[in-house]
Structure formats: structure tokens, C-alpha cells
Image: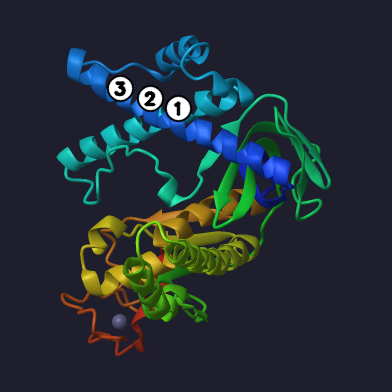
Amino acid sequence: MSSNRSIIQRAYKTELDLNHAQTTACRRHAGVARWAYNWGLARKQSAYRATGASPSAIDLHRELNSLKQTVVPWMYEVSKCAPQEALRNLDSAFANFFRRARLKREGKWHGQLGYPQRKTRKRGLGSFRLTGSIVVFPDAIQLPRLGRLRLKEQNYLPTSGAKILSATVKEQAGHWYVALLVEQEQHAPANSGPVVGVDLGVKSLATLSDGTVIPNPRPLRRRLKKLKRLQRAVSRKRKGSQNRKKAVRCLAQLHRHIAQQRANTLHQFTSRLAKTKSVVVIEDLNVSGMLKNHHLAQAISDVGFAEFRRQLIYKAAWYGSQVMVASRWEPSSKICSGCGAVKAELTLSERVYRCETCGLTLDRDLNAAVNLANLAS
Ligand SMILES: [Zn+2]
């Protein structure tokens, strides 16, 4: 394969190192964004009830600007982007809701529809997005209205060769992060690695067609007991009390650790695949369909199949690898990878594949991974 150049969008997320005044300013921006979102949601709902039509983000922003002078003068204290981008988010939340509703009517979506909800402070301080004049330094980022904010990690954000599209500042469990969205030219080097099939599993994270088994860290399962205990602790404490606030903070910390550990495992695995393989063949799993099976549900959402696929596809573009998604109707687990015979029946409990035609006996997941790799050759 030859090397290729393309323009890609990429997000860089890193932690901010804020002083007191900056923390206050960020809280204020997040507060305005949340207020604008909730105000826009209420406006859309009442307009829809009255007229059957719903105002767009642009209509709402115009209306909000006229209110600014009289009703919400404190909005002048923050960048005008914060409410504007919050109203854009609201538009996408509705667009996503309508898309899922259409898919559900067509029988292609089995999950929740997710009607846009009010944002509450109970779920954290939230986030806000800024556009316009954003400058990146090796150890800091300069944002409209907020000025120069220090970064905990130096030289991570790109200082050159990237067009900055937006910066989203977000609070998570007492820490503030910035996610920088940039557009950059991607020079993907020629990747001369082998073709590999990947069978995503429940018992182990994945089995590769070369026989490698990637173990499953199962962070959620291991920490589930602790999570349940903390959740009980929160509900036992009196509402509004200091003790309850403390327990809520502990719970948020644990959620954050679990999410980080899960993301780390997937990032390591997908990077390794994209860097070392020329073609990666994966199965198009019907995740929302599988999630209905409660035994599998925990493990699948734990491992994050959809997230795996998302990461693999964008990293493959960085490292010059190709991702092939096999149709979900391809019976990769039922075909014998040695002779091609197809089994009529293979239950989930049969962990070893035994071919009645050629006598091949091997691990069920490995057989499936080899079949996936064969699709590419
Ligand atoms: Zn066979």
C-alpha cells in the first residue's frame, strides 16, 4: 500500500491547571451554557405546543440576544459563544432524537430514543464550547474571555500545522479539561503489516487470527461491588447534607476511574492494531440488539464494542491501515476456517469448534477470527 494524505478532524483532550479566578470564570461559562440550553429546550417545547413548529438555534440565539439587555444581563460576563454553542448542541440533540425515532420505526434501532433532557447541576457543572480566537502554547491555551489557561501536560496540544475549530471546556469530578477540535493534514505512512481478523469477545476482550488473545480487564465488573456500595451510601444520606455531598463526590471519582481505565485499554489495543496491521477485519456487531440479552449486556457495555470500532476506524486513517467491517450476516463463527464447511447449529456455550467434515478442532473465537481474516484475502 502507498502512503496517502488526507484532511482529518481530530480532538485532543487534556487537563487544565486553573487558579481560583479561572475556575470561577469557567463555572460561570458552564452555568450560562446550561441556562441557555434549558431555556432553549423550554422555548422549543412551548413553541411546538403552540404552533407545531420549533425554532432553530439561530432563531433562539436572536431571541436570547434581545433578552440579554433586560432579563439576563449577567450573560455579558461570559463569551457570547457559550450560549450560542449550547443552542447548537440543543439542535443536534433534537436531530439525533429524530434520527433514532426514524430508525426505530424502520426497526433498526432498539435502544432508548433519548428525548433531550434539561441539564441539571446534579450531573456535574457541565461544559461549554468556544470558537473564534484560540491560541495554543506549549504549556497553555488562550481562549476568548478566559485568557491564558495553563495545561497540566506540556506539548500535547498541536501548536502548528492544525486549524483550530473549537475548544470545549468540561468539568469532571472536580477536574477541568479542554478538548480541542482541529483539522489537520494527515500523512499516513505506508503500512506493510499483516492482515488480521479480530473477534471481539465477552470472556476475553478479543482474539486475533494470529492466535493472540487480549485479556479483558473488566474494570466495571471488578469495581461493581464498590460502585453498588457507594450508591447505597449516597441514598442513605440525608438530601442536602454535607455527608451526602461527600458521598456523591466519591461516587463520581469512581465513575471517572472506571471510564479512564476502560478508555486506556481500548486505546492501547486499537493503537497497536492500527500501527502494526495493514488490514483489520472486524465484525459488524449488532450491539443494541445484543444488549437486550442481560447476561451479555454488562460485559459488552463494559468492554465498549462501539467505542472499539470508532477508535479503530479513526486510528487506521492515521497509521495507514485499512478496516474492513464484515456483514453481521456473515456466519464467521459457524464456518470451518480449514475447509469452509458451515455448521447448522453452534450454541454460545460451545467454546471449541469441531468440524465434522475435516476434523479441525480449535478455539471457537480463534476460528471466527481466522474466518474474518480470510474475508480480506
Ligand atoms: Zn472443516
Q: Which residue is mark 2?
A: 40
At label 2, counting other C-alpha atoms closer than 10 Å, the crowd grade (few under 14, some 14-19, many 20 or more) is many
Q: Amino acid at mark 2?
A: Gly
Which quadrant would residue 289 be assigned to in this image?
bottom left
Which quadrant would residue 117 be assigned to in this image?
top left
At label 3, counting other C-alpha atoms closer than 10 Å, the crowd grade (few under 14, some 14-19, many 20 or more) is many
Q: Earlier in the sequence, mark 1 or mark 3?
A: 1
Q: Which residue is mark 3?
A: 44
Figure colour scheme: rainbow
Residue 234 in view in this figure: yes
- Position of residue 342 in the picture relative to residue 135 (left or right): left
Tag 1, which secondary structure? helix
Taking the spot 25% from the left edge, 20% from the top edge, the residue there is 46
Tell me if label 3 and label 2 are in contact, CB under 8 Å. yes
The correct choice, above or below, for 96 with respect to 224 in the image is above
Tell me if label 1 and label 2 are in contact, CB under 8 Å. yes
Q: Amino acid at mark 3?
A: Lys
- Position of residue 301 in the picture relative to residue 20 (left or right): left
Which quadrant would residue 330 be assigned to in this image?
bottom left
Residue 273 location (% of width, % of height)? 58, 65
Quadrant of picture, ligand 1: bottom left
